[in-house]
Image (cartoon, rainbow, N blue to C red):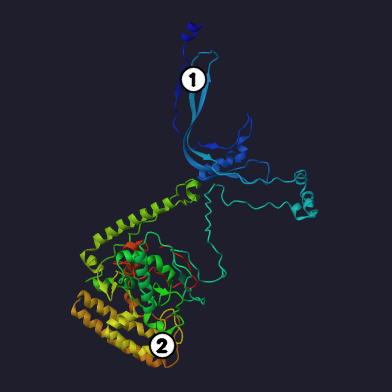
Amino acid sequence: MAGDSATAPASTMRLEIPKGHASNISIEMPMLFKDGADMASYFGGTTNLQTIQHTKTPFLPVKLRPREPNAKPIFADRAKTQTFLLHVTKKKRSHGELSGKIATVTHEKFVCEGMVDYQYLAANQYTERANDPLDVRLRTYLEASTQDDLELIPEVFSRVDLPLKYEFKQRPMYNETQTPSSDLKQVPRHFFTYANFRSNSPVPQEVQRLPKTRGIPLHMEEHVMGLLKEKLAERPIWMRPKLFAFFTTEECRVAMKFLPYLCYIFVNGPWRGMWVRLGYDPRTTPDAAPYQLVEIRGTRRLVSETVTPLVLLPKTKKKSHRRMPYRSRLNTVFQVNDVEDKVAMHLKKKKAHNRSLATVKATTGDDDRRNAALVIYGVPLREGFFYVQLCDLVDQNPAVKAFVAPFQKRLRSSASVWGGWFPMCMFPPIREMLKLHIVTTVGRPAEEINVRQAQIDRAVRNAMEELEGRGGVDSEEDKPSTKDEESKEADDDDVAAADNESVDDEEEDDDAASDDGEADDGEADDDDGPFIESVMI
């Protein structure tokens, strides 16, 4: 017996491999079918499958109960695969030759990746009359005595059928706010509070407790906290570079831990983007007029000999109309909440931004690198825009001080979102004086300086005439009706450069807070409605 089994011939099989066809597709359903079962009825028949395959629809509805109208379908997702159907033929002999053939090769499949929601079935009283005439079937609903007899289909419990990470992490010390309709939001640690200038809500008041610091020496913590309180008592509103000029690099990092508990930031208005002491409302205090912001745009043409073409904007590509590739809903809907993945994504975006910034600097030339370190009135001159507080400008520029003196006696009755406490006619001459100081500092030709001086004289005369014509009545609107010379002078290239600078400020780390820090923590546009949010630093 052992010898006979050892000498028995082994079975062999020949295999033929055909080429794959694009029309072939595989369907994986979470069911076991018996022989002779109508499998096509579960996904709507072969006609429905052909339509979905022809239109490349990424989802295929599958009904677990195809004859039940109230049953909700599950959706199978289209995915890539390498699948073949093997047809094997065996002869009657026990050790005969086998013949195999790959009947079908497919590169796509529909697989059910989601979970099944609750299924609802119709009551027997309705299924028994399903084949009756319409008037007989409707009589069942007319005879309903309760709401449950109306056979109303409940809504879907889940929005998606894919499992998502819940990760509910409620803070133990969380307390629900007493005024949920307020436009201000009290922030937790390491967050800034942003307020809307147009809102009538009171400004945030001083916090009751300070943050817990770990790893910071006690003497440095006391020194930084004492210096911050001293500077905020001296001036309630500060720009970032002006305040950080009193600190070292290490002290700036420590100061960023305490500033959210000492200051808040306006997202719009004449004090936008600056750190305002908690409890101090410049909208109701005329003494806050000297701390307003004076901003100019279009500084690119002030520091360059000629207006060079902007290299920050990519070339417009021709639009191509093509079908977007389908992808699994696991990649589309699944949200990664892990802290490590967020940090990795942040570093990846930052590296890409640094690479693009290095390419831009390499193409802009030596003039841009030289002007990037230029400091005007203690504020770095950024390409595209520049802003400084009016009090610093008055202290260091005698011409501006003499020009502003008459306006300080003619303040508005209420603060405006555009001009603050001063009339709007005061700012065009100040912007021209600030531009003259910049072009003089960078060494522009004498002809251009003379032309700008003539523009300043003309703007000063117009401002004085308008001030005298106003009288004692505040006749200005919140929004200027005509554009000033500054807005006419700024072109599209300079505005785009300013937008790129604002993106650079979002990517900026706390390490650069002492030297290359932005003038404010949040560059914000003048929104029309209430806008309050907290941003992690």
Judge whether residue 237 can be spotted in this image: yes
Rendered residue at 76%/52% (across/down) = 149
How packed is label 2: few (under 14 Cα within 10 Å), some, or many (20 or more)? some
Taking the image as shown, residue 281 lies to the left or right of residue 464, namely: right
Q: Can you identify the residue that label 1 sits on? A: 99
**Observer-nearest of 8 and 505:** 505
Q: Residue at x 40, y 59 (%)?
A: 214
Count of numbered circles on the image: 2
- Mark 1, secondary structure of its residue: strand
Q: Which residue is mark 2?
A: 411
Q: Residue at x 45, y 29 (%)?
A: 18
Furthest toward the front, the residue is: 219
Please state, as top left, top right, bottom left or bottom right, where the C terminus lies in the image.
Answer: bottom left
**Is residue 266 in view from this perspective?**
no
Examine the image and state in which quarter residue 444 appears.
Answer: bottom left
Please say if 253 is above or below 243.
above
The picture places residue 25, in percent across and down from the top left corner, at 51, 37
Q: Decide: is 2 above or below 434.
A: above
Between discs 1 and 2, the one toward the N terminus:
1
For the residues labelled 1 and 2, the Cα–Cα distance comes to: 99 Å
Tell me: 31 left or right of 317.
right
- Residue 471 in percent (x, y) is at 42, 93
Give SS at disc 2: loop
Q: Foreground: 323 or 109?
A: 109
Which residue type carries mark 2?
Leu
Amino acid type shown at disc 1:
Ser
Q: Position of residue 159 (x, y in %)?
A: 58, 52
